[in-house]
Amino acid sequence: MLQPPDTMPFLQHALDSQLESLALQQVVPALLDQGFFYVDHFLGDIAGHMVLGQVKRMHSCGLLNDGQLAGRSSSGVSRRNIRGDKITWVNGTEGGTEAVNFLLTLIDKLISLCVGRLGKSIRARSKAMVACYPGNGAGYVKHVDNPNADGRCVTCIYYLNKNWNAKEHGGLLRIFPEGKPYVADIEPLFDRLLLFWSDRRNPHEVQPSYATRYAITVWYFDSEERAEAKRKYLTAVSQESASP
């Protein structure tokens, strides 16, 4: 519903105030202390359903393809035995992704409010990875998003699964926090936003899913680490091209 023009600045201020409180009072302390954090009802029911509708349309239109593996997998190991999701990448400016763009804008704003207190120089992020586990028992084995200092600093995952029952549907994201005597099981519940460090502090897995499971993931980059990773890559490419 459109609001009268004179109420819009107030609503925007209220939203910004809520994000600032979330960032400074909850996200930053949790990341610094335990390395991960999640918040429910991030967008609200109406906006969340709009994002879900756009993701379902991408899926039904055949835009999602098998997720790829970084590097080379072990000989004889099927990709599907490592990750069974189907994905596509969007930046939020494509037709039919307006609600996804709204989600990305809010996550960007939340991260920007955290940056000065996280000890990181975050100035960019990846495109959004829209992912679907089709409900056939597919999952993603234990892994680290950024094991080799590629620049990814914070992983943000937004879940889109209505009426999810982990006992019946599986699909938990299990985090194995480095040096901690516990694991953290995160249910992929509708309108839940999860944030965690992307590096070796947070190995994690997606347990087998027995219902269609949707999520949108973005990675925020530490600018210094990202620049160094690009420099090393260009040096390696140059040396390879110069070799006989």
Image (spheres, helix red, strand yellow):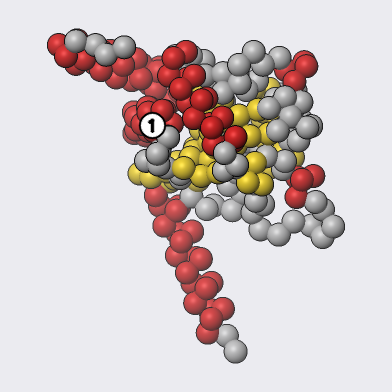
Residue 213 percent across, percent down from the top left: 65, 27
Considering every residue shown, the one lying at the far front of the view is 61
Q: Quadrant of residue 189?
A: top right
Above or below, comparing residue 227 to residue 125 in the picture: below
Left or right: where does residue 75 sit relative to residue 60? right
Crowding around mark 1 (Cα neighbors within 10 Å: few <14, some 14 to 19, many 20+) is: some
Look at mark 1 in the image and give the residue it sits on. 98
Considering every residue shown, the one lying at the far bottom of the view is 244
Closest to the observer: 165 or 75? 165
Total marks in image = 1
Closest to the observer: 201 or 64? 64
Left or right: where does residue 9 sit relative to residue 200? left
Is residue 157 visible in the rendered image? The answer is no
The residue at 59%/53% (across/down) is 148
Considering every residue shown, the one lying at the far right of the view is 76
Left or right: where does residue 135 sit relative to residue 65? right
The residue at 37%/28% (across/down) is 102
Residue 111 percent across, percent down from the top left: 39, 31
The residue at 74%/56% (across/down) is 73
**Which quadrant of the figure contains the N terminus?**
top left
Label 1 secondary element: helix
Q: Quadrant of residue 99?
A: top left
Residue 58 percent across, percent down from the top left: 54, 36
Residue 192 percent across, percent down from the top left: 53, 20
Is residue 7 visible in the rendered image? The answer is yes
Residue type highlighted by circle 1? Glu
**Which quadrant of the figure contains the C terminus?**
bottom right
Above or below, comparing residue 234 to residue 87 in the picture: below
